[in-house]
Amino acid sequence: MKSSPWWKEATIYQIYPRSFFDSNGDGEGDLQGITSKLHYVKTLGVDAIWLSPFYTSPNKDGGYDVANPRDVDPRFGNLTDAKKMIEVAHSLDIRVLVDVVPNHFSDQHVWFQEAIKAGRGSKERARFHFYDANPDGTPPNNWISLFGGPSWTQVEDGQFYLHLFDSSQPDLNWENPDVAEDFEKTLRFWLDLGADGFRIDVAHGLVKEDVLKDHPDPQGLSDALRLDMPMDPERRYALLPTVPYFDRQGVHEIYRQWRKIFNSYGSREVMAVAEAWVHPPVNATRYVRPDELHQVFNFDLLDAPFNAKHLFEVMSAAIELMQSVDALPTWALSNHDSPRVASRIGEVQSRALALFVLGLPGSCYVFAGQELGLPDGVIPDESRQDPIYFRTKGTQKGRDGARVPLPWNGDSAPFGFTSGSPWLPLQDSWKELTVEKQDSDPKSSLNLYRSALDLRAEHLVGNGDVLWTESPDHGAKSDSLLAFKRGNVSIYMNLSEEPVEVEITGKLLIVSAGTVDGRDGKVTIPPVSTIWLHH
Ligand code: NOJ
């Protein structure tokens, strides 16, 4: 069954264009490469793809440093390729979401170049956050970039500009009407080209407050905002509400305007999902008010340990939170910014968790390669590209591990990804993980995802609320068992290394690993495995 509107319980496949498939042998994935593999995407059974940026960019931050948001970077092809890709996707009944990056531009964007030339006090500088140095020559405030180092960079005439990320990503000033006007053009440009919606980068970041005030603990705050930085939870929770540059009320006015733009496309059911890291979690619901956006990412599973109590808490909280505003949650186990789930919790664990999550209500985001059970790549330091690595002088390795290209076929790296030399090295040990190998193995991770998505569409989409039946709050038989029922399907996840027996009958629809034993009204769930039973 399809949900209505289409995005409500959609499965959305995230493609990192540079790493998907290289059609021209330059070592980097491109739009024609994506188009040529859309038939593969179709076999997965997903409803839509979301593409990370492929716009004109000097590529200092994997394309999230956009120099022209209404054109394609030559490394990925051109606008004709983009149009073709969208057309082919549509012919296969796959919707296309593109990334929009409204918090910052690249320093190579014509606006920033003009701002540098025009000098202090100019209307060109007013599109960004340019300020004079303090009397002692220091930056206007002490904020620390999310990528490490100061949030300010000085230009020749002595003024500083704000960049919450890399110095090549100057933050836009959304109080300047030119900015909203330009983004309306960008949104309409991609919608007119055929796109079905957007993933909004740093959606919570556009509006800043207290730009000229110091923060009492800027390094602590920057670390607290980063999922990958270990921190005592109490300290983190004390710091998060003090952030002056994220989740300000003003961002919602922007999305109310954007919603009008989306709605003007009527029956096309344009949708947008916000990348909004907010605290407390209830603030996320504001982004999906009826006159704002359609979905907001829930990042809780990106760093969740494989632990029943923890998973139950974050899953049930996300469901309840969204229920309170009549919306559905979103789920993601991996993305291009975080370690791949198979590396983080283990391969067999990641299968069990994926199968469990694919049964939940809401939208599931699957990061390309996740369906193959791909681990993070091992990257030699000299091949690293992430600005985090450089801005922290190598003390943080950054996100390249999750961005290694996909292995398609053959017995040795680069496994058909490119006929040239891949921009990040694929591992020789991925021989058994290629699409080609997994395609013909009924027990492969790839075929698990395909079957699960089929069964999800048949039995679960649109099939109502979750009724928890085994959880720390519902008398679970074991500390390592979680189960819920939706409609006619019961879903059990055994997180332990031992088999668990439960009293239940039903037809086995799917198991993530191992062999299920069922007799006399009892079912034995294999170790570290999820099963779906139909009643
Ligand atoms: C979030 C994106 O997912 C990430 O890759 C990027 O570096 C930052 N936003 C800055 O645009």
Image (cartoon, grey):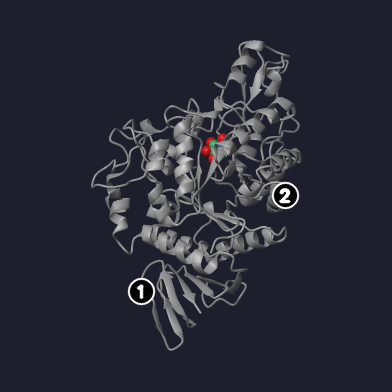
Looking at the rendering, the quadrant in which ligand 1 lies is: top right
Mark 2 residue CB less than 8 A from any atom of ligand 1:
no
Seen in the image, is 332 located left or right of residue 323?
A: left
Foreground residue among 457 and 471: 457
Residue picked out by circle 1: 515
Seen in the image, is 385 located left or right of residue 155?
A: left
CA gap, disc 2 to disc 1? 44 Å
Seen in the image, is 442 located left or right of residue 105?
A: left
Query: For the point 23% across and 47% down, which residue is it?
Result: 411
Across and down, in percent, residue 284 comes to 68, 50
Tag 1: amino acid: Thr
Across and down, in percent, residue 519 comes to 41, 86
Q: Is residue 109 visible?
A: yes
Across and down, in percent, residue 328 comes to 64, 58
Which numbered tag is attached to residue 286? Answer: 2
User: In the figure, 272 relative to 6: above or below?
Assistant: above
Which secondary structure lies at badge 2? helix
User: In the figure, 299 relative to 320: above or below?
Assistant: above
Which secondary structure lies at badge 1? loop
Foreground residue among 324 and 289: 289
Dot 1 alpha-carbon crowd within 10 angstroms: few under 14, some 14 to 19, many 20 or more: few
Dot 2 alpha-carbon crowd within 10 angstroms: few under 14, some 14 to 19, many 20 or more: some
Q: Is residue 501 visible?
A: no
Foreground residue among 189 and 175: 189
Across and down, in percent, residue 382 comes to 36, 30
